[in-house]
């Protein structure tokens, strides 16, 4: 497969904010993009910011069967139920790219995808699905893409180039798990606290809250280090404070989930951290406490 041909046909599973953003940019870069949703609609009209609407084919089995690349942008807790039924419909060399908050959702199904090049992407682009017809690109960021299996190592450069042509910058990172731990560490600090306090990210900068975050950071860095990845306690704390400042006006994704009465990603964020902490016999009482409080809130919400 040469570079220009790579990912010519792309199907996106999950037309949320990031899925819709990538759909529009990849379409504008000349790719043939289709969507796969929970509904039964055969097309979906979407506009990026104030640009003219694009009509995407939707839920069409022929598009799925022809896809060179399947991008899975559903939430971590939806991955298995949304992805498993369509796996058998993909052609053997179709690449699969997952992107969601948290860790632990893909590992268990990875052996079932051994035929395919499998990747993970983490992105800091801001996107908002304003309504059914429009997605807003609310913040310029970057995308890091890494391989999850050997087959993906070979294809990594071409996939990153496809993203760079559509929505730069995109970088290849062969050590994608380090990038994912860096992201999950920040999410463990910001997401549960904002959801429990019903506040914007910026409100976590209060002195007493920063003391809690400092404790969270030391627990988190102990787990990440035990996992064999690099994480310095003081650096993590400094980075978390930077993200709090840079995203001060935002409501975190977990805040929004609780606010809209949806299941959260807690099992794949703090829950994953706690699971790895248990495996290494590391005490993480502050993270455990936040996890339990979010589980209680989720139980109070009727989904
Ligand atoms: O990734 C985020 C999220 O909300 O899930 C942060 C970085 C906390 C920004 O809101």
Image: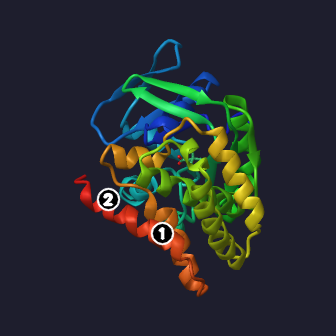
For the N terminus, the image quarter is top right
Residue 14 falls left or right of residue 245 = left
Label 2: state its secondary structure. Answer: helix
Residue depicted at 49% across the width and 31% down the height: 128
Residue 122 falls left or right of residue 33 = right
What is the crowding at mark 2: few (fewer than 14 residues within 10 Å), some, or many (at least 20)? some
> Which label is found at residue 33?
none
Q: Can residue 166 be seen in this view?
A: yes
Residue highlighted by disc 1: 271
What is the crowding at mark 1: few (fewer than 14 residues within 10 Å), some, or many (at least 20)? many
- Residue 183 point in image, percent of width and height: 64, 55
Label 1: state its secondary structure. Answer: helix
Q: Is residue 68 visible?
A: no
Q: Which of 203 and 267 is in front in this view?
A: 203
Give how far apart the Cα atoms at labels 1 and 2 are: 14 Å
- Residue 245 point in image, percent of width and height: 66, 41
* Figure label count: 2
- Residue 71 point in image, percent of width and height: 53, 45
User: In the figure, residue 171 lies in which quadrant?
Assistant: top right
Q: Nearer the viewer, residue 287 or 58?
A: 287
Q: Which of 141 and 32 is in front in this view?
A: 141
Residue highlighted by disc 2: 298
- Residue 31 point in image, percent of width and height: 60, 29
> Reading the chain from its start, which is encountered first: label 1 or label 2?
1
Residue depicted at 64% across the width and 59% down the height: 180
User: In the figure, residue 167 lies in which quadrant?
Assistant: top right
Residue that lies at the very extreme toward the front in this rendered image: 207
Residue that lies at the very extreme toward the bottom in this rendered image: 281
Q: How is the image coloured?
A: rainbow
Above or below, comparing residue 169 to residue 267 in the picture = above
Above or below, comparing residue 179 to residue 14 in the picture = below
């Amino acid at each position: 497969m040469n570079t220009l041909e790579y990912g010519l046909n792309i199907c996106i599973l999950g037309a949320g904010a990031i899925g819709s953003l990538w759909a529009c940019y990849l379409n504008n870069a000349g790719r043939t993009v289709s969507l796969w949703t929970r509904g039964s609609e055969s097309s979906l009209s979407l506009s990026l910011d104030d640009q003219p609407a694009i009509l995407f084919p939707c839920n069409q089995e022929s598009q799925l069967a022809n896809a060179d690349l399947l991008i899975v942008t559903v939430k971590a807790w939806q991955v298995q139920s949304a992805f498993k039924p369509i796996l058998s419909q993909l052609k053997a060399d179709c690449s699969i790219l997952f992107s969601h908050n948290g860790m632990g959702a893909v590992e268990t199904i990875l052996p079932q995808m051994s035929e395919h090049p499998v990747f993970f992407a983490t992105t800091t682009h801001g996107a908002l699905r304003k309504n059914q017809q429009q997605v807003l690109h609310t913040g310029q960021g970057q995308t890091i893409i890494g391989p999850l299996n050997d087959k993906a190592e070979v294809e990594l450069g071409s996939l990153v180039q496809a993203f760079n042509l559509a929505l730069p910058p995109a970088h290849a990172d062969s050590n994608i798990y380090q990038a994912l731990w860096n992201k999950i560490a920040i999410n463990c600090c910001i997401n549960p606290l904002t959801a429990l306090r019903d506040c914007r990210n910026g409100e976590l900068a209060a002195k007493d809250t920063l003391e809690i975050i400092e404790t969270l950071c030391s627990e988190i860095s102990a787990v990440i280090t035990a996992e064999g990845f690099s994480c310095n306690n003081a650096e993590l704390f400094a980075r978390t404070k930077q993200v709090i400042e840079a995203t001060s006006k935002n409501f975190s994704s977990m805040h929004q989930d609780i606010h809209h009465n949806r299941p959260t990603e807690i099992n794949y964020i703090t829950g994953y951290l706690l699971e790895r902490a248990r495996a290494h016999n590391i005490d993480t009482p502050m993270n455990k406490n936040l996890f339990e409080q979010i589980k209680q809130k989720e139980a109070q919400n009727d989904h």
